[in-house]
Image (cartoon, rainbow, N blue to C red):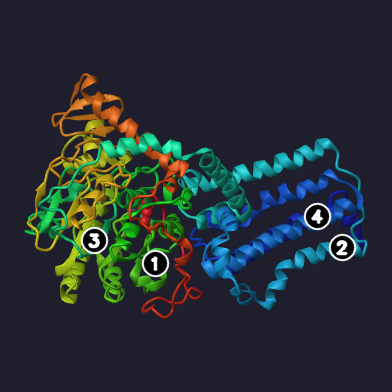
Amino acid sequence: MTNLKKCMSQPHALYVIAVVLLWLKTYIVYRIEFRLGIDSILQTFLLVVNPISSALFFFGFALFFKGHLKNWLFVLIDFLLSLWLYANVVYYRFFDDFITVPVVFQHKNFGELGDSVLALMKPSDVFYFLDTVVLMVLILFKVAQPKEKMPKRLLKRVFIIAVSVFLINLGLAEIDRPGLLTRTFDRNYLVKYLGINNFTLYDIIKSTQVSAQRAVASSNDLVDAENFTKSNYTPPEPALFGKAKGMNVIYISMESLQNFVINYKVDGQEVTPFLNSLTHDPNTFYFDNFFHQVGQGKTSDAEFMLENSLYPLSQGSVFMTQAQNTFQAAPQILKSEGYTSAVFHGNYKTFWNRDEMYRALGYDKFFDASYFDMSDENTINYGMKDKPMVQESMAYLNQLPQPFYAKYILLSNHFPFELDEWDVDFPAGHTDDKVVNQYFQTAHYMDEALREFFADLKASGLYDHTVIVMYGDHYGISPDRYDSLSQALGEEITPYVGAQLQRVPLFIHVPGVQGRTVHEYGGEVDVRPTLLHLLGVDTKDFIAFGSDLLSPQHRQIVPFRNGDVITPSYSYIDEKCYSNPNGEVVDNRYCEKASEYAKDALSLSDKIVYGDLLRFYKPKGFKPVDVSKINYKFDPSINIYGKTNDQSDAHNSMNEDE
Ligand code: GP9
Ligand code: MN
């Protein structure tokens, strides 16, 4: 007791106790309540230390005061922080996600919680407030005596220490997960690396920026974009318009697949024999001058473009920051045509904020990892392996009301391109880089999965009335590996060649329609009008930056997100103009027209996305999404393969990103 008294006589004892108690409790909550997927010592270390900086910071405010007020302020701050932590616990139990500012202000998700809040609380949860009780006891029993105000000099030091601890934490987190704050893949990652309170602060800053831009925007801002897109509208080829009317649609995002892989051989064997066979399938259009146009949002940016025909942002992912916007996306457009929409993905729904964004896009159902058998032999790297995923998905797909619009996001061909030993049945490449060599093996694995999927679709009878759109979402081999890739390709990868390598394969299979290889230049932004025209949906009234790839009037200008542009004749890269296909540098004036177009298109699209301008736009006959009617809560009644959420332990223990 005397020791305790001695400790408590220190001027800042209660501050230290409050910080330590909250720190320990937060760590315990992380471990018990959240599935953060800790898979290295550094991540464990960061999880342990990440509550410290915010605890030092918030309790620091009590130090501005003195006496009893100061002591009770520690209690109040502790209570508020505990309440916030606990609110997240309850929210997570239901949504498998953390609370964000838009969620709080729109009451959307909270509304859904409704009566179930009580059911989500457990009697043992009172322990999550034990630290507040301890602080109160220390004060009430006069163990903690009222103290003087902290001198200004020391006060300053407290906040400097708090900020320094945060910066060290952030530095270490960035080492483990580069681009954590700029790309912000997943809220789980931010909490795992930076802590729940720092995540909330970050979220408040981001949301304030987003809503400030939204608040100053008005319908007048839409005029330029509307004029631009309408004057650039590409009418469909009449012979193809409506040729797939009423058919199902299956989109397949072929992870990281670049076009150079098509018809490429390793040790005399084709990497993608199945896709190669589709390049001359009688009912398939294969586009060999098709480019990805993604920014930092990678897969999510590709999805965004394909369904909205808008460009992604130059920083971050639209999925992460603008999910509260109004969109007029393909799933919702097709709803009025009687379509049911669904996504199949072997990762968890929070990745790329898909659970929020898919609602805004109008998706009816989301079969994420919870619906699949995520056992060890079925998973690797970012989630479920493609073969078991497509195989298990059939049971769900077969039950969808038709016509459906379904999207598959494959995963196995993702950096660092790893396979389990027993899944390898293809030779590795022969460069000096293991990652590049493995890329051919994972691409081959994906190709086999696609072959199996097509066979399943044929067996189920769906194949004959389903349009299948398959696209490489973005590059797999990043520029820092070009030296090794050049060994595989047998040519030096200059900036010009590097830009040409951004071609990704696009296949559109339309039953009953004569296919061909299409050499027109185009990009991901062009897919929506192409598909909608095939389905017989007029796109004149929608704001879209793409141009129908099958139209004789297709506009062959492909802007990249960094402002580079490619046309059939010229490539404008890093502010240099090259002529195609020899790559000779020519005068910049040859690229001027295309580059002007790209600048205008990108900036007008950005204006729409940042200003949430589609909320002012009402396309004829379009019924806006009612997000309150959509939720992706795990539904045990339709689940076949998944464990229940409570049992799933693999959540987010996904690997490194490139
Ligand atoms: C994760 C997957 C990968 O769910 O979509 O995303 P990427 O890293 O390719 O953007
Ligand atoms: Mn991807």
* Dot 1 amino acid type: Asp
Q: Which residue is mark 1?
A: 368
Q: Is residue 375 at least partly visible in the picture?
A: no
Q: Nearer the viewer, mark 3 or mark 1?
A: 1
Residue under pointer 2? 138
Residue type beneath disc 3: Met
Q: Quadrant of ligand 1?
A: bottom left
Residue 400, picture quadrant: bottom left
**Rendered image: mark on residue 74:** 4
Q: Relative to 115, does residue 350 appear above or below in the rendering?
A: above
Callouts 3 and 1 close, C-beta under 8 Å = no
Q: Which mark is residue 446?
A: 3
Q: CA distance from mark 2 to mark 4?
A: 11 Å
Cα distance, mark 1 to mark 2? 48 Å
Task: Give the distance between the C-alpha atoms of the residues marked 3 and 1, in whole angstroms.
Answer: 19 Å
In the image, what residue type sits under mark 4?
Phe
Q: Quadrant of residue 27?
A: bottom right
Q: Are marks 2 and 3 in contact (CB under 8 Å)?
A: no
